[in-house]
Image: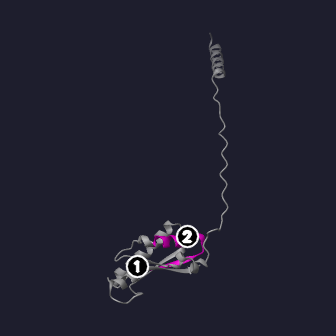
Amino acid sequence: MNATARITLAALLCVGLAACAKKQEVKAPPPEAAPPPVPEATTAGAYTPADLDTDACLRQRVVYFDFDKSEIRPEFQQIVACHAKYLRDRPMARMTLEGNTDERGTREYNLGLGERRGNAVMSALQADGAQASQMNVVSYGEERPTCREHNEDCWSKNRRVEIVYTAK
């Protein structure tokens, strides 16, 4: 057999084998399921500025702390949750968190502790859905006491963060 015949025979053999080869089926991807309908936003149950003066939870705007601590006590978690919901419902609302301490400790220490307390409340509000841009933390340390006596009952009233709305 000459070379031309061999090449022709090999080409025919390749074409024949290719024709007999099992074709792979290309399956179309299944149609995507339509996304579930998005429920319409409702304002039912949303706080309004009037609620700041009428709602029992929102009227409470002081969070108290234990001596030398910056962790929010469990009994104040609900107050923080109410204010976080207000901030979620009202994106244009703004607040200042004013951290305070009792008179014990140095001025520098108390300013730092007041800031840590304000930041603790801010973190809790953010954990409940409020935006950081809605809040500002200020520490007054021991400079703004609500009680001036020198006993534990009075000091416990000074260890606090006051929630002050600057835009409702």
The image quarter containing residue 46 is bottom right
Q: Residue at x 40, y 83 (%)?
A: 157
What percent of the width, then of the height, locates residue 68? 34, 76
Q: Which residue is mark 2?
A: 85
Residue 111 visible (yes or no) = yes
Q: Nearer the viewer, residue 16 or 2?
A: 16
Q: Which residue is mark 1?
A: 114
Q: Residues within 10 Å of mark 1 (few under 14, many from 20)?
A: many
Quarter of the picture containing the N terminus is top right
164 left or right of 154 in image: right
Q: Nearer the viewer, residue 159 or 120?
A: 159
Region rendered in magenta: 76-98
Element under disc 2: helix
What percent of the width, then of the height, locates residue 166? 55, 81
What percent of the width, then of the height, locates residue 18? 64, 22
Indicate whether 21 appears above or below 89.
above
* Residue at the extreme top of the image, as rendered: 1
Quarter of the picture containing the C terminus is bottom right
Three-letter residue code for mark 1: Gly
13 left or right of 98 in image: right
Q: How is the image coloured?
A: one colour
What percent of the width, then of the height, locates residue 54? 58, 79
Image label count = 2
Looking at the rendered image, the disc whose residue lies closer to the viewer, 1 or 2, is: 2
Q: Residues within 10 Å of mark 2 (few under 14, many from 20)?
A: some
Element under disc 1: helix
Residue 167 visible (yes or no) = no
Q: CA distance from mark 1 to mark 2?
A: 24 Å
